[in-house]
Each structure stands twice: as C-alpha cells, then as structure tokens.
Amino acid sequence: MEQLNPFANPGRTKLALVSQGVALPAGLQDASHWVAQANATESVIDIRLPSGHFATVPVAQPYSERSSIQLTQQDVSGSAELRWGDERLDIQVLPAPRFYRSKTRSGARMGSFSSLHENLLMLHPFMGCGFFARQGAACQYCQYDSMLNEDEPPMRDPLELVEVVRAALTEREIDTVYLYNGYSPGDDVGLSRLVPVIALLRRHLGHRQIALETVAPKDVAVIDALYAAGLDIFVCNLEVHDADRFAEVCPGKESAGGQAAIWKALDHARNVFRSGAVVSHLIVGLDDVESTKKGIDTLIAHGVVPLLQPFRPLPGTPLEHQAGPSLGHMEELFLHLYAAISEAGFPTHRLRHMGRVLTPMESRVLDGREAMLSERWVSSSLGRRMDGWLDGLRRHLRASNGGGDEILLDRRPMHVLLAGEALPFAALIVISLLAFAAGSMDVPQGLSQNGWSSLVVFALCLVLWVTQLLPLAVTSLLGLALLPLLDVLPASQVFSLFGNPAVFFILGAFMLAAGAMQSGLSERMALLTIDRFGTSPRRLLLTMLLLPAVMACFMPEHAVAALFLPIAWEIVRSLGLKAGNRYAQSIFFALAWGAIIGGVITLLGGARGPLALALTEELTGQTFSFADWTLAAAPIALSVLLVSAIILTRITPMTGIDVSSARERISLRRLEIGDFDLKSKAMGMLLVVTMLAWIFAGHSSSLAGIALISVVVMFALRLVNWRAVEQHVNWGVVLMYGGAIAIGKALTVTGAGVWLAHVIFPESIAGLAMLAVLALITLMFTEGVSNAAAVAIVLPVAIPVAAAAQIDPITVALAVGIISGFAFMLPMGTPPNAMIFGTGFVRASQMLRYGSLLSLAAFSLFIITVSLWWPLLARVGV
C-alpha cells in the first residue's frame, strides 16, 4: 500500500504524530525542559504546527523510536524540524510547564499526577486503578503504572489538586480540567468520593470546564450528583464496538457490567448534561474499521459524541507487540466521524481541547475545510466565557437537594426552567408597580390617607402571602417596613409589637418541643404505643392516626409529623410495600391527618392559635384562655378524627398484611434507645406541670410567662442544649407574627378594617351565616398558604365584620383560628401534607380526593358545633 504523506495537511500531520510518535534526536539539549509526562507512563513533547494546530506527541517509547518521522532540534528556543523521508516541516517545540517541578503541601511533585497540554489540564485524583489489583483484570492496552494499585486506590488530598490548578493558571489560561477516575469497588466505582472534589474545583475554576473520564458506575444516580457538584463533561469509554473484542481486551470492565453498564451510564448522562457534553472514546486499531464506524454511528444515535484514540503498543502490556493502526485507516475513520457528527448537528465545541488526536472540530482540516463563523465564536475567549456562564445557569436551575444526600434534577426544557425562574421576579415587579399605583390613587370616600395606605400594605402582603413569591416571614418584614415609611404608624409602635405575649408563648412552645425530642421522650412514647397497640393491620393503622393526634396536642404538628415520618418509613419498608400500595398510602395519610387534627385541639399544635390570640388582643383588647380554645376546638377536632378513621378503614384493604415484621423493627428500635431514662422522665413531668398550669392559669397574660419559666427549668435541669433549640425553633414564625400583628393593628387604628368590612360583607349577613362565610373563606385560604398566614389574612377583616354584625370578637377569633387548622387537600397547605407527598407514596390527586372529604366534614362539623356546643360555653357563643 502506498504510504500517505503525513505532511500533506495539518490534520494528517497531527494524526501521524500522535499515533506514531517521533524519534528524538540523539543528545537532545536540556531534554527535561521539553519532555514531560502525558499521564502516569507516557513521555511526550508538545509542539505547534505551522498551521497553528497543537499536538501532544509520544516520545521515548519503542514504537516512537521506530517512527518514520524524526525530529531535529534547531536551537534552544524550541524551533525544530520534522523529517519524513525527503519532506521537511518546521515546527515549534513548546517547553514543559514550569509548575511540574513544584511540590504540593504534602511534598508531592505536581508533575507526577498532572499534565498540561495547551489549555487542557489533566489531573489524576486517585493513586492508581483497582483493576491492577486483580490478576488479569486490567485493560490489555493500559499501562497505568502506579505504586499504589490497591483494590480501592487512595485519593489525593483535594487541596493538592487545587494547588495544581492554581499553579497551572499562573502559567497559562486553562479551558478544561480533565479528571481520571480509575476503578474502585462498589456500585459507584469511587465516584462518590469525587463529588466534593468537583465541587471544590468548581469554586476555583469559574467558567472553565470540568470533564471526568470514568469506568461505568452501576449506580447511575451518582452521575446526577457529579453534575450538581459542577461537572460539565461526562466521559465513559466504550473502547471497542464489538462486544467479544471488548470482553477480550477489557476483562475488568467486562466483569464490572460490560458494555451494558457503559450504555446505561451514557444514556443516563445524556439526559443530564447538555448536548455534546457526553463523550465516549473508541480505540482505533483494536477493532476493524467497519466495526469502529458502526461504533461511531451507534454512539451518535444515542446522543453521545465519539472521540477516536489510536491504539499505541505500550511496553509491558499484553498488546505491546500488536501493530498500531495505519495512517490511512485513521484518516478514513476521522473523516467518517466528522461527516456523521456534522449530519447529526452535534455541538462539539465543548471538546475543543480534549482530543488527544484530532477533536471533532479539527477533523475537517483533513479535507481542507475551514472553521465556520459559529465554531470560531464558541471557541473564542468571550464565547467560552458565555458558554461557561450558561452551563452554570443551567445547573443552578436544574439541580436541587432533595434532602440528605439526594440530588433532584429538573429535566424540563431550559426555556421552561428560565421562565419559572424569571416569572416570580417579573410578578414581584408587576405587583410592586400595582401597589405603587394604588397608593397614588385618590383616597376613597370615608377613608383617611393613613387608612388607604394601610389597606394598600395589607393588600400587597395578602397577595405575597397567597402567591408565596417571597417567604412568609419576609413578606411580614416588608409590611413592618412600609407602615412607618408611609406614616401609617410610628416606627416605635410597629416594632414594639414583637413584644406581644403570644410571640413568646409560641417561642416557649417550640423550645419545649425541642426538649421533648432531644430527651428522647417523644420517640420513646411513640414507639412504646405502636409496639403495644399495633398488633394487627387495622390497629396499627389506627395507632398511626391516633398517636400523632395525641402528641400534636403537646407539640407543634410539623414536629410531630417529622417525628413519625421515619417510623412510617420503617413500617412500610418492613412490610415490603411499594409505591401505589393502598395500605402504605393509608399509613402516611394517617400520620399526617392525625398530626393536623390533633394540632387543632390546643394552642400548642401550631402558630395559628397564638396568632389569633395576639391579633384579638391587639385589635380589641379582649382575650381568651388556653382552656377556652380547647373547649371550643376539641369537639370539632375529635369528630373530624372519627371521620378520618372511618375513611381510612374504608379505603384500606387489610388482607394480606402481616405486621409482625414491622413490630419487630419497632421493638428493635426500642432496644436501641432503651427505656425511659431520667432525662426523658423529667421532661415528661415538666410538660405535664406546664400543661396543667396553662389549663388552670393560662390566660393571655400568663401563657407566655408559664412557657418561659418552663423553658428556664428545662435548661436548669440540663434536659436540652441551645443547639437543639435553634434547630427546632421556627424563627420565621416570630417574624411573621410581628408583621401580621402590626398590619392588623394598622387596619384597626386607621379605621380601614371597618371600612373594608362594610365594602365586602352586606349588612344582611349576620350570626351563624356570617361565621359560616368567614369559615369558608378561611378554609379556602388555608389550603393555599400556611395556617398562620390564613389567620393573618382573614382575622384583621373578620373582627370588624363581627363587630358590625354584633358578634363577639372572641367567637370570630376562635372560628377563624380553629377552622384554619383543617388543611387536608393540597401539599402546600401544611407541613405534614408536604412531608407525606414527598415520600412518593401519596399522589396529589389522592390527597385532593380524600382531603376534600375531610375538609367538607370539618366545615360541616364546625357549623354543627358552633350552633349546638359553643352557645353552652361561658366565653363563646353566636
């Protein structure tokens, strides 16, 4: 076969150089200044061709010494000449980076685990590959010569990698940092250890790309974590297309899942990374040309960019005597690659410096094509920065933490994600402009300027509370800021409302709940009750309903749900139930409904009760006690609890459920935490005494005092530490209280509340009909916003309405506060709903279907109780 002239065009020259290498001249001056390591084994020189193309050329290898291309050094500046027969080509040999000789914090030479070629920095985070620790498992072409080829290779200090990156950046601009991950045992092949490394590098690299070449993991979820940490390009090598040849030359990879695992990883990555950012190498020369072409076409069909790497017979490998590919075959395959990628329309600019041979963009020079304008733009400095910024934006929009170590990726199209991110901001601007326009309007008749301003602030906060464009607490802060700025109320009066006793009552309740959880009292009580009463599927289900209801009488409902959620998980797992199982759904419904319903019975179940108490006292000067609330709420809540039990037992099949395994897990957990110890008993006694004090002496003026004294006693007895309190106290509730109370006060002082009540409600509505309308409005609000936000929205208007209809404001406050607790239909209505929805066992349609039945029952039972029971109470009546 006629030999091709390697100097015919820059593409062919580069192909010949990187596949054959060059023979170095004898007596090369200052060889260490030019020759460096490309990886752990190969010596290379970097050269620049007259066309400007860059090439990393193997040297000092048996196959390179036999190369038909020789290098002749011209002078110490790097000017040199390549010779092929009578052909000559002037080139520039580039000096090896100076930082190679520098040392890291541990004394390791930086060049021993890194190499820099033009704008591509290669790093080896792991000190070896686990395949070399297994006899006959290493790839037969690989010569990853490490002193630490252990089954699970140790990883370098991540800060050493950062040191190398920073040192390399002082010498030249870096476009891509390329990491190698050798094999480690486990389903993630060691990739989990690289997640924090990539996150660390991302903080130092800005817009620059991070690429990772890895063995295929069986657990593809780790790919999501790598992307979220900051990885831009995922590389998993198919090596050869023919399955039998793959098994022959890559025995370790074959035993670790083979090509099936590689395809699984590539297909998963393709749905995670941007187009053109999932890559797989094919080794030219280990498979026949036609099979390699099929490999190229198959990868492209899967949305993966193929990169071609020439086989080089490295000494010491099983294939050291096999000949490398011919230049003609190399050129044929690269032209096929360029044509296939062009036809597919792949964006390959992200791989601009990644081809150790020719990148897909460079392959065009084999037939004399010039770079298109778009290719020049994306390869320019500004284009690279823009692309890096877009990658970061896409990652920000798509990746979120799902709790714990779980990474959730939003796979919707980019324009949808952008719209979702931009629309809330745009909505905020529109709402703000509308509020400004409303404030500039003429004041309606019968209302003062201050009253109109307070109504505008109330309307603005109402819209923001309902839409939740801002966190509830932040919206309240906005209201606090606007009231004095608009001269509605003096700043001293506005901010003094944070001293309302209800604020400190709920703070004390949160702190006592933290003590109950840290002391182990709440978990021990829960496990003991379930172990004792959950002896059958029906009894276990009812116990999971009733026990959270009881505990929510003593601590906030969201804390109760958080306590019981892992217990429900253990029950479902021990029973072997999967998503869609009706019994599993009912277990989660039971814990949420129990916590929600029980939280209504006392003022301790949530923020809505104390907020209703505070607003009533600030707006009317009247108040109600702990016992008043419980006497009014208990009949409604207990009746709704009975209805929920009936619904659960009717919709849940009990046959085929063996609860013995669940009870065994519960018993095992009881053995782990032990019986009630001195600390949990002391916490239980303190809570009992506190509850009795609230019941018999708990008017608004003393509720907060009792709570704070109990908190002091709890700390004095060392039952809790401050860190646990910080974790359980919802400081956002405190901020929301201040804003809601201040806005309600402004509506009352300026007369805006009375004016609004006359505008909204006709005078013909009074008595029970008025309470029913207010309850229905509150019930609608509480499904879309938090219970406390519903109270903050409705009660400042409801109290003036009640006054006009000659209804006791205490009755209205109790009605709004109690009915706001029954949010069953939507996940955002209350934390317990959101928690069970997040398990994946409860669908939104099911929550809406069964929750609407409970909400309807709650409203009906509320009307019945208000009509028949409340008139019998001394403090409450219609």
Image (cartoon, helix red, strand yellow):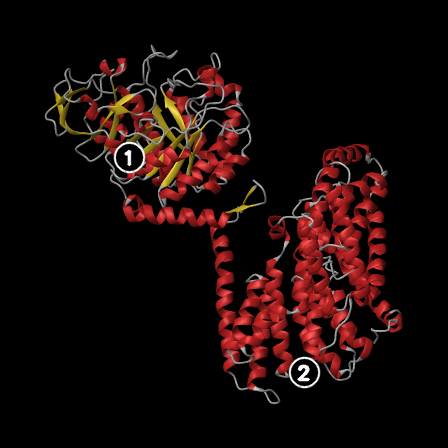
Please determine whether, in this image, residue 197 is positioned above or below residue 18. Answer: below
Task: State the separation of the CA atoms marked 2 and 1.
Answer: 76 Å
Q: Nearer the viewer, mark 2 or mark 1?
A: 2
Q: Which residue occupies the foreground of this view, 670 or 94?
A: 670
Q: Quadrant of residue 630?
A: bottom right
Please determine whether, in this image, residue 396 is positioned above or below residue 669. Answer: below
Quadrant containing the C terminus is: bottom right
Residue at screen point 33% across, 19% down: 41
Of all residues shown, which one is farthest toward the front?
Answer: 716
Left-right relation of 351 to 705: left
Q: Position of residue 58 (x, y in %)?
A: 26, 21
Q: Which residue occupies the foreground of this view, 143 or 725?
A: 725
Residue at screen point 63% across, 66% down: 737
Amino acid beneath label 2: Val
Q: Position of residue 234 (x, y in %)?
A: 43, 35
Residue at screen point 53% across, 19% down: 255
* Label 2 packing within 10 angstroms: few (<14), some (14-19), many (20+): many
Q: Position of residue 176 (x, y in %)?
A: 34, 38
Residue 867, visible in the rendered structure: yes
Badge 2 is on which residue? 754
Q: Are the residues flagged by discs 2 and 1 in contact, CB closer than 8 Å?
A: no
Q: Which mark is residue 362?
A: 1
Quadrant containing the N terminus is: top left
Numbered disc 1: secondary structure:
helix
Q: Quadrant of residue 816?
A: bottom right
Tally the numbered discs: 2
Amino acid beneath label 1: Glu
Q: Which mark is residue 197?
A: none
Left-right relation of 109 to 405: left
